Amino acid sequence: MTDSNRRRFLLTFSAALALSLTPAILHAQPTENWRAATPDELKSIIPARAPVISERIETEFRTASGVTDGSGHFIAGVVMITAGYSAEGKFSHYFLVQAPMRVGTVDFSPGDYVFGWTRSQDALKVSFYQAATGKEVGQVDAVRNPSITRVESFRIWPPHGAATEPHSVIQIGRFSFPYLLTK
């Protein structure tokens, strides 16, 4: 894919995504109080072993990331070490949601989720599941994000920040997908 075609694809994808989120934007939560969670805050909410279906899968805390409103609500996640578990190849991340949110067309109510991804030519197809049951709740495509200059295994960016930072995105490597806090 040429650079011109790639830019055209990203522009078209961004416009389509913005249009799909327009109804949710009308019911979005105020985001001015949301900020990156501190390591101590993450340690208080991220389990050492994530409850996934009937297993408790070890998490890799150094990959933990999250945001908080400072009033006890978090959206956070961490990479799981799935080798030797039935989740291997299907789930890769534990995802804790304590405030209603939307990713693509998927609405998340507060709860515990897991997700995994598969690579396509220019994106990651991210599939979300309820952690307790393994029931799929939806999918979203994560696209290569040119504004992200630091590759990280997992990061949740706060809904606001400096003009040079990506906003309201969840990052997996060089890829990201937007999220929206809802009421």
Image (spheres, rainbow, N blue to C red):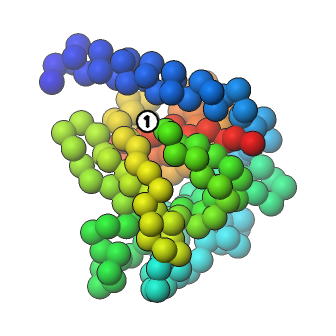
Query: In screen coordinates, is 127 left or right of 65?
Result: left
Q: As drawn, is 173 to the left or to the right of 98?
A: left
Residue 155: x, y in percent?
51, 51
Q: Residue at x 75, y 42 (%)?
A: 183
Corner quadrant of residue 29:
top right
Q: In the displayed image of the protein, which residue is found farthest to the right? A: 71
- Neighbour tally class for label 1: few under 14, some 14-19, many 20 plus, Cα within 10 Å: some
Name the residue that disc number 1 marks. Answer: 148
**Which residue lies at the image location 24% right of the left edge and 49% below the top edge?**
119
Q: Nearer the viewer, residue 123 or 166?
A: 123
Helix, strand or loop at label 1? It is loop
Q: What residue sits 58% from the left and 47% below the top?
A: 107
Residue 39 visible, this orientation? no
Name which residue type carries label 1.
Ile
Task: Give how far across and how far down residue 48 sits, in percent.
Answer: 55, 80
Depicted 97 relative to depicted 151: above or below: below
The reply to whether residue 80 is in sight is yes
Picture quarter with the N terminus: top left
Q: Position of residue 131 (x, y in %)?
A: 51, 71
Tell me if residue 130 comes above or below residue 83 in the rendering. above
Give the residue drawn at x 53%, y 75%.
Answer: 132
The total number of labels drawn is: 1
Q: Residue 157 at x, y = what percent?
A: 58, 43
User: Camera-side residue: 139 or 38?
Assistant: 139
